[in-house]
Image (cartoon, grey):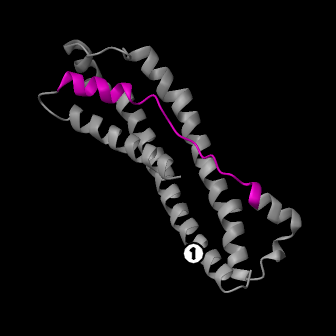
């Protein structure tokens, strides 16, 4: 999960950097080229739910601590589902809006944008609007991940405490 959080954090930073570069009078072409080329990637949740599915099949009441049982079900049935929904929306926007726009309007894969290409990108309001939307979606998903990680860390401490007290 930390690696995925790092990916989202990087993408938010990358877009903020693009906006910073576009706001400068003197624009380093190679920096903008690198940042725009880095817009291509995205992340997604790979949650191992096998233990949770086993627990559900054996009966959630196996966990006798009510607050612990609620925390476990909330993590899998609410938090992970919310992340997957946010990622689905982000990936659809990425694949159906950002990527087609980049492919049709911006020369990707070059080592350095020409001066004319930089001027074009700087004046391209639709591109900047798409970037704001992608940044917002990445930030919202990053926030979900960070909150879920905090919940997961607390849950693991609580499970460990229950196991050490022999109450599991």
Image: magenta residue range: 28-51
| Label 1, residues with CA under 10 Å away: few <14, some 14-19, many ≥20 | few
**In the rendered view, does 50 fall on the left or right side of 154?**
right
**In the rendered view, does 28 fall on the left or right side of 82?**
left
Tell me residue 33's x, y (percent).
Answer: 29, 23
- Front residue of 89/42: it is 42
Q: Residue at x 68, y 77 (%)?
A: 68
Q: State yes or no: residue 33 in magenta.
A: yes
Q: Residue at x 52, y 32 (%)?
A: 94
Q: Residue at x 75, y 59 (%)?
A: 51
- In terms of secondary structure, where does tag 1 sit? helix
Tell me residue 10's x, y (percent).
Answer: 38, 43
User: Mark 1 = which residue?
Assistant: 157
Residue 50 vs 88, above or below: the answer is below
Residue 108 vs 163, above or below: the answer is above
- Front residue of 2/84: it is 2
Question: Extreme right residue here?
Answer: 58
Q: State yes or no: residue 144 in magenta.
A: no
Tell me residue 15's x, y (percent).
Answer: 34, 38
Residue 89 vs 73, above or below: the answer is above
**In the rendered view, does 55 fall on the left or right side of 78?**
right
Q: Split into 4 quadrants, where in the image is the C terminus?
A: bottom right
Q: Residue at x 11, y 28 (%)?
A: 26
């Amino acid at each position: 999960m930390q690696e995925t959080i790092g990916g989202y954090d990087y993408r938010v930073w990358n877009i903020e950097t693009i906006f910073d570069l576009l706001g400068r009078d003197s624009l380093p072409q190679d920096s903008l080229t690198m940042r725009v080329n880095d817009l291509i990637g995205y992340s997604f949740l790979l949650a191992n739910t096998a233990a949770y599915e086993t627990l559900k099949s054996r009966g959630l009441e196996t966990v006798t601590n009510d607050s612990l049982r609620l925390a476990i079900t909330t993590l899998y049935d609410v938090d992970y589902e919310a992340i997957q929904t946010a990622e689905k929306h982000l990936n659809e926007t990425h694949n159906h809006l950002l990527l087609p726009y980049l492919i049709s309007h911006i020369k990707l894969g070059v080592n350095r944008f020409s001066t004319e290409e930089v001027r074009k990108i700087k004046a391209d309001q639709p591109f900047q609007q798409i970037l704001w939307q992608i940044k917002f979606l990445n930030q919202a998903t990053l926030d979900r991940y960070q909150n879920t990680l905090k919940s997961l860390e607390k849950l693991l401490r609580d499970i460990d405490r229950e196991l050490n007290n022999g109450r599991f």
